Amino acid sequence: QKEVEQNSGPLSVPEGAIASLNCTYSDRGSQSFFWYRQYSGKSPELIMFIYSNGDKEDGRFTAQLNKASQYVSLLIRDSQPSDSATYLCAVNMEGSYIPTFGRGTSLIVHP
Amino acid sequence: NAGVTQTPKFQVLKTGQSMTLQCAQDMNHNSMYWYRQDPGMGLRLIYYSASEGTTDKGEVPNGYNVSRLNKREFSLRLESAAPSQTSVYFCAVRGAGGTYNEQFFGPGTRLTVL
């Protein structure tokens, strides 16, 4: 069974801090990696994707990928209460364009 | 431009009843998906349709059937509902072109089976 693992949390950080969310995956041949944000009672929405080793920055968000260690992370700088949500890691396993989702990490940013 | 729509938003069924969840998209994309989301379980793929006229099983297809009626619509049917099917159901559409790897989700249907 090919898996995507996340710590369910909750991860609690103060406003203005850096939130670090981590995800590991089992399929070494995976090529595409995604972070979705899901507010309570709402549907997931894509916030970041990364395909190559290294860092990818978009505003306050940075995705980091390390294929050798099979992990992908999401950093949120200057965290805001509006960032409080569940963050889902998704991975396209080798040969598939259908993502496998992790169980999600709940993030709470407190004022 | 509504993107992906789902009906109904909420539904309560009794064990053994049947119902169909509807999904429609105005994005003119080929691939559509049905997921269920349970607390602590993440999103699990039930069925998907790569294009009009084709459907395939996902991770948890038992107890469900699907129909890809046309390019716009992809429905999910529960023939005999069970309490284990209490969940939130999301329909998703795969992007195309520059968003080909992105999944666009509908607002969800919250189903309770008593």
Image (tube, coloured by chain):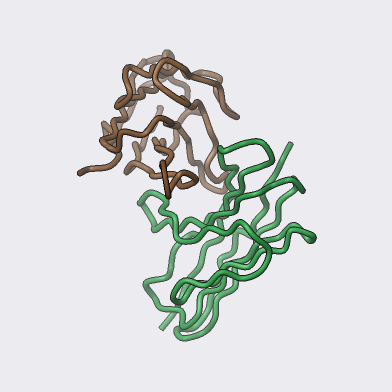
Chain colours: A green, B brown
Q: Residue furthest left?
A: B1
Quarter of the view holding residue A98: top right
Q: Residue furthest right?
A: A68
Residue drawn at x 52%, y 46% is B39
Check the image and report above or below for A94 versus A82.
above
Q: Nearer the viewer, residue A74 or A28?
A: A28
Q: Position of residue A94 (x, y in %)?
A: 69, 40
Check the image and report above or below for B79 versus B6.
above
Quarter of the view holding residue B61: top right
* Residue A2 falls left or right of residue B62: right
Q: Residue furthest bottom?
A: A16
Check the image and report above or below for B69 versus A3.
above
Q: Nearer the viewer, residue A74 or A59?
A: A59
Q: How many marks?
A: 0
* Residue B101 falls left or right of residue A23: left
Q: Nearer the viewer, residue B10 or B105?
A: B105
Q: Nearer the viewer, residue A30 or A19?
A: A30
Residue drawn at x 67%, y 53% is A5
Residue drawn at x 53%, y 58% is A49
Check the image and report above or below for A45 versus B113.
below
The N terminus of chain A lies in quadrant: top right
The C terminus of chain A lies in quadrant: bottom left
Q: Position of residue B94 (x, y in %)?
A: 43, 39
Q: Position of residue A28 (x, y in %)?
A: 77, 48
Q: Position of residue B58 (x, y in %)?
A: 57, 27
